[in-house]
Image: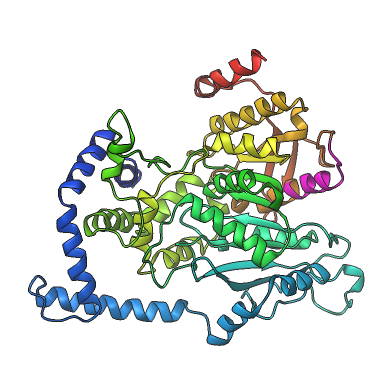
Amino acid sequence: VRPFARQRMTMVSGLLCPRPSLFLALFLLLFAESYAAKYAWTMSHKATRGVQGSSSLSPNQQRRIRKTRGELVRRRQNHRPPTRLRANMRSSSTVELQSLIGNNPSQLIPDEQEVEGGEGILTEGKFRWQKTGIDIHYLRARPQPSAKALDHEEETNYDKGKHEDKQGTPPILFLTGFGVGSFQFEESLKCMARKGRVAYSMDWLGQGKSWPEDIKGLQISADLWVEQAQAFIKDRIGQPVYVAGNSLGGFLGAQLAARYPDLVKGVVLYNAAPFWAFRPSEVFRPEKAEDGGSLWHLVWDGKLPAPQIYRTFASRAFDNLRHEFNVKTLIDLVYAQKEAIPPKLVNKILEAASHPVGPDAYASILFSPKSKLSFAAALQTGAAAGVRYLMLYGREDPWVVPMWGQRAYLNLRLEAAKLGKPVDEVVRYLEISPAGHCPHDEAPETVSQITDDWLVALENNDGGHPLEGKISIPCDIEEADGRKIHVDFQGERPPRNAGEWIGTISLRSKLSNR
C-alpha cells in the first residue's frame, strides 16, 4: 500500500507543482486557445441558464448541465442561512456586537447558534462581508461564568479551580490553513475559552462553509483573504485582536499584521507557510516595460469566471486533491502521531470540498497573484510597527520543515537588530515534538497552554523587556489522552543538519556582519 500511496502523492504533487517547462507549455497552450475557451464558456453559460437549441452542445451534454445546475441550486439552498438569520446579520451593528462581547463574553449573540458537541462553549454564525456580499462562516468560543459562580449541582465541563477569568483582554482570532475550515480549531477554541478568553475562527472565502453564490468578478487571492480578516475584525469582533495562524493562516496573519498593525496585538505562528502563489503581484505588459515585459500578462489572472480550459485543468487537479484516498494520505503524512488525528477530520474536509463552486474557487486560487509583501518582508514590516511574535512549530512537519522556522526567526532577529531591541522582545521561537504540520490540532492542550502563557506575558509587559512566561522551557506537557509533548526553545540554536545550514547561511551572515 505504501508504494502505491507514494505514487498517488507524487501524481497530486505533480499537478500542484509541475516543472517550469510544463508550466511554459501550459501557458502557450492557454494563450493559443483563449478565444476558443471564451466561446466555449459563453455557450456553456447560456446552456446553464436554460438557453436551449445550442448546436455546439449534444443532448447528453445539455442533460449533464441541467443536472449540475439542479445540484448547484440544492447545495446553495443547503448552505444558505435562514432568512431571519440573514436579516439579523445585516442589522447587527459593530457597536452592538462590541457591547455584547465586551460586557459579557459568555452571552450568546442573537444570530449565533450553539455547535453540536461544543460543550456549551462553541457557537457558530454567519458574517455578511459587505465588500463581496458573501456570508462568512465562523466559530466563537465564549468563556463561561467562573467556577465560584457555578451551582455545585449543575453539570459543567470546567474543573473547579482550573477555570480562569480573563474578561477585558483582547480576543484571539485563529486563522485556518488551506483546504480546511474553522472546525480544525474547535479544540483550540474550547481550550482558550476554558482559560477565560474569547476566541474566534472563520472559514476563508472559498473554503469550509464560506462559499459564494455568485462567483463573477471574484479573484480569490491572499490579499483578498487579508481584507476578509480585516473586515471580520473591524465589523464583527469590533476591537483589536491577537492573531494565531497555521500554515496558510500563519502567512496571512503576518500579512495582516504588516498591513493593519493597529488591529493586531500580537501574532502566533503555527508552522506558517513561507510563501503562497506563483504569479507575480505586478505583471508588466510589453508596452509598459523596456525589456518587452513578461509572459505572465498572457495568462489568466484568476478573476472569475475562469476560461473553460483553465477550469478544466483546475478541476482535474482539484478532483484528485479532494479524493478520499488522497485526503487520508495527506493527513497521514502531515500528522506525526496517527492516534492524534480526529476521527471526523477526513469527512469534514470532504464535505467542505464537495461544494459545486469548489473547482472555480480552486482555479482562481491557483492563478491569482502573490501578495505584494513576501513572508519575510511582512514579518519585518510588522516587527517595525511594534507587533510581537510567538513561533510555535511542530518539529516533525514534512512540509514546513524546521529550516523554514529558522529562516522566519532569523528574519525577525535581523529586524530586532535594526531596531536596537532585544530579540526576545520581538520574537520567541519554540518547537514541540512529536507534532507535525498542524500542532494546534495534534497537541491542542500543549499549544493552548504555551500560547496563553505568552499572551499573559504580553499583557503584563509594557515594552522594553523580554517576554518570559510562567512556563519554564524546556518542559513536557500532557495532553488529555495522556500523550506527553516536549516543548523546547530553539532561538539561538545552531543548524542541526545540512538543510538548516544551507537554508539559513545568508541570514546568519547578515547577522554576523551587523
Residue that lies at the very extreme toward the left in this rendered image: 55
State left or right for residue 283 relative to residue 230. left
Q: Is residue 460 magenta?
A: yes
Which of 148 and 97 lies nearest the eye of the viewer? 97
Residue that lies at the very extreme toward the top in this rendered image: 513
- Residue 18 seen by the camera: no
Residue 305's place in the image compared with 404, above or below, is below
> In the picture, residue 143 is in which quadrant?
bottom right
Q: Is residue 468 magenta?
A: no
Residue 250, horizontal then vertical, whole percent: 58, 46
Residue 230, horizontal then vertical, whole percent: 61, 57
Residue 46, horizontal then vertical, whole percent: 21, 75
Q: Residue at x 73, y 48 (%)?
A: 451
Q: Which stretch did the figure color magenta?
A: 451-463
State left or right for residue 233 relative to residue 73. right
Residue that lies at the very extreme toward the right in this rendered image: 148
Residue 316, horizontal then vertical, whole percent: 27, 56
Screen quadrant of the C terminus: top right
